[in-house]
Image (cartoon, grey):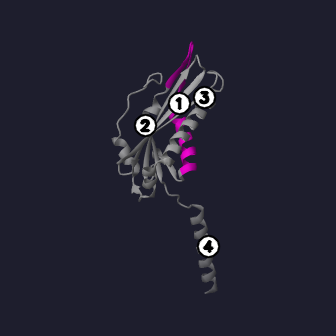
Amino acid sequence: MKLKQCLSVWLLACVSTSALAHEITLTSVAVYIQAQDYDHPIRLRNYSQDYWVSQAPMLETAALEVLSKDFGGVEMCDAKPLESKVLVWLRPSMFYNPQMQTFYGKVTAMTLTADGKPLGKYVGEASKRAFFDVKTDMTLKAVYHAAMQGVSNKMKADTKFQEALKAPSFSSPCATASMLPESKIKFMSIQ
């Protein structure tokens, strides 16, 4: 009898510890970046040099860092979140001006409730002076991070967006992403 009680207490302790270790975080923001931003790199030019870059991985990293810090539970639509309160559709843009030696980045965020109703449009822009051929990836990441921070600051200031974060969650928030319009392929990052 005592052995059964000890065994049941031990089993209960193991189950509760594993439940705490695998605590489920609620997703409040689902982030969507179109497949073409992953599949079609853009070309940045500096006179006789070209630099091809896929924008989406850099933007994804910046978005997860910035939005997670500001809004908590953030997940990419690729991870297929079970529920979310808001869907954020991100569209990147990058340009390099060789005369000014400046990278110009822009992130446009269209926000929707998880059931597809539009909330707002936020644009974050950033620029950074840097040489084209010196640590270009680091410069591009810094520009996208700064532009994403601008978008996040505008989201925090918008009361409509804040109210949507307090609303109940919807299941399968990224299902509405398939209905978003497909943008034209950008050549040389000119839109």
Q: Secondary structure at mark 1?
A: strand
Q: CA distance from mark 2 to mark 4?
A: 45 Å
Residue 127 shown left or right of residue 122 in the figure: right
Label 3, label 2: how far apart the Cα atoms are: 25 Å
Residue 83 seen in this snapshot = no
Crowd rating for badge 4 (residues with CA inside 10 Å; few <14, some 14–19, many 20+): few
Question: Which numbered dot is residue 34?
Answer: 2
Q: Nearer the viewer, mark 4 or mark 1?
A: 1
Is 123 colored magenta in this rendering?
no
> Few, some or many C-alpha atoms within 10 Å of disc 2 (few <14, some 14-19, many ≥20)?
some
> Dot 3, how many residues are within 10 Å of its Cα: few (below 14), some (14-19), or many (20+)?
some
Q: Mark 1: few, some, or many residues within 10 Å (few <14, many ≥20)? A: many
Front tag of 2 and 4: 2
Seen in the image, is 184 located left or right of residue 100? Answer: left
- Magenta residues, as a range? 42-70
Q: Which residue is mark 1?
A: 105
Which circle's residue, 3 or 1, is located before the other in the chain? Answer: 1
Q: Name which residue lies at 40% across and 44% down.
A: 120
Which numbered disc flags the more N-terminal residue, 3 or 2?
2
According to the picture, the residue beneath numbered tag 4 turns out to be 13
Q: Position of residue 151 (x, y in %)?
A: 51, 41
Name the residue furthest top: 48
